[in-house]
Image (cartoon, grey):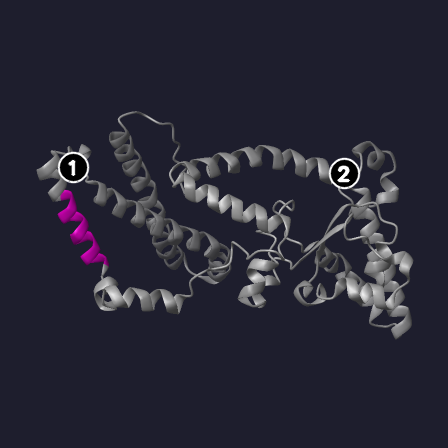
């Protein structure tokens, strides 16, 4: 691992590098010491000119400790966007068909064949980042696995408008928070991004769960703070709150549906949607099971499957009309029958 990584960076002009590796949390330790001790001086990287970050791919990160979740996460690292770091693993899906040939080979031939095919995969991936005209000019050279078009250009076209959406959401969230607290958080994050070794990770939890609950118990007994409430108990408390607001504020209830009742309807609608999704996923299996069934059995089964779909369609229209009543204006919506 050290050899091919160091040799690939020899005489590099890249100023910022992100190394995605399953065990980057361990491999990144003593990285420069190993380079200086075991490799030629010409391979050494000037730390003042080249910045190397070590991160763990998102799929592999949950298997690491909690400390790694904050220090080596792509979600918190700057200048990586929504990269998952799993690109080196995707080549295995393309190489699966090669197993029918390599399983008959000896160790040396097998290793050489796999390396040749991965080299071809990497070359096609790099070429796909270029201009679409270059790929279209020589389609036989690039093969069917190389997408027509520039991968980088396609991703940029998605990233730029999405950045505006996420930035607007961040501004809306920041506008309802304490400005001084937001400024303090931003200062901590920027300081950590400049030099992670000089300050604590601002994304790391500062109060453990055990300490949090111990502090709570000093003020309020746990059974009083987190009582065992049923759904009926919650609905009763919300109904009592609605009644109090009706008496004190003179609140009008459009359509005889209070805010708490509308929330309950939304929760029921969400649960019903999950049931419909489940039935849709099982439809293919059910069709296979009904191949030899009688017409009566088939009709009865499809009736049971159709009932939640019909209920969902009717409740959608009902809750949209209630939302319109509360907003005092009409908004556009479309109900697609399921």
Q: Is residue 235 inside the magenta stretch? A: yes
Query: Which label belongs to residue 265?
Result: none
Q: Is residue 311 inside the magenta stretch? A: no
**Label 1: which secondary element:** helix
> Which numbered disc flags the more N-terminal residue, 2 or 1?
2
Q: Is residue 144 visible?
A: no
Q: Residue furthest bottom?
A: 106
Residue 249 in the image, given as x and y percentages of width and height:
12, 35
Residue labelled with disc 2: 148
Q: Residue furthest front?
A: 198
- Residue, x 70% and y 66% (percent of image)? 29
- Residue, x 29% and y 64% (percent of image)? 216
The magenta-colored residue range is: 231-242
In depth, the one of 60 and 270 nearer the eye is 60
Near mark 2 (Cα within 10 A), the count class, few <14, some 14-19 or many ≥20, is some
The quadrant the C terminus occupies is: top left
Residue labelled with disc 1: 256
Q: Residue furthest top?
A: 329
- Residue, x 35% and y 56% (percent of image)? 300
Along the horizontal axis of the image, is 69 left or right of 129?
left
Q: Is residue 34 visible?
A: yes
**Magenta residues: mostly which secondary structure?**
helix
Residue 89 in the image, given as x and y percentages of width and height:
71, 59
Q: Quadrant of residue 88?
A: bottom right
């Amino acid at each position: 691992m050290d050899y091919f990584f160091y040799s690939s960076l020899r005489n590099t002009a890249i100023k910022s590098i992100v190394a995605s590796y399953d065990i980057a949390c361990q491999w990144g330790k003593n990285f420069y010491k190993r380079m200086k001790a075991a490799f030629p001086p010409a391979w050494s990287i000037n730390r003042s000119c080249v910045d190397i970050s070590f991160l763990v791919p998102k799929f592999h990160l949950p298997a690491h400790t909690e400390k790694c979740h904050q220090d080596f996460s792509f979600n918190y690292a700057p200048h990586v966007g929504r990269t998952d770091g799993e690109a080196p693993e995707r080549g295995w899906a393309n190489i699966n068909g090669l197993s029918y040939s390599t399983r008959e080979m000896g160790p040396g031939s097998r290793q050489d064949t796999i390396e040749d095919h991965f080299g071809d995969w990497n070359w096609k991936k790099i070429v796909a980042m270029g201009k679409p005209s270059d790929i279209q000019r020589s389609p036989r050279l690039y093969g069917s696995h190389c997408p027509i078009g520039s991968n980088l250009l396609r991703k940029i076209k998605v990233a730029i408008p999405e950045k505006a959406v996420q930035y607007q959401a961040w501004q809306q969230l920041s506008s309802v928070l304490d400005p001084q607290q937001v400024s303090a958080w931003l200062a901590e994050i920027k300081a950590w991004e400049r030099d992670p070794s000089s300050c604590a990770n601002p994304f790391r939890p500062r109060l453990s769960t055990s300490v949090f609950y111990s502090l709570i118990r000093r003020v309020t007994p746990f059974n009083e703070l987190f009582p065992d409430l049923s759904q009926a108990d919650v609905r009763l408390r919300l109904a009592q709150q609605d009644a109090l607001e009706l008496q004190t504020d003179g609140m009008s209830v459009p359509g005889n549906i209070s805010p708490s009742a509308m929330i309950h309807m939304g929760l029921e609608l969400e649960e019903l949607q999950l049931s419909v999704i489940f039935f849709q996923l099982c439809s293919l299996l059910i069709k296979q099971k009904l191949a030899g069934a009688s017409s009566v059995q088939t009709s009865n089964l499809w009736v049971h499957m159709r009932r939640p779909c019909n209920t969902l369609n009717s409740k959608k229209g009902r809750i949209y009309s209630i939302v319109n009543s509360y907003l005092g204006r009409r908004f556009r919506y479309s109900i697609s029958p399921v």
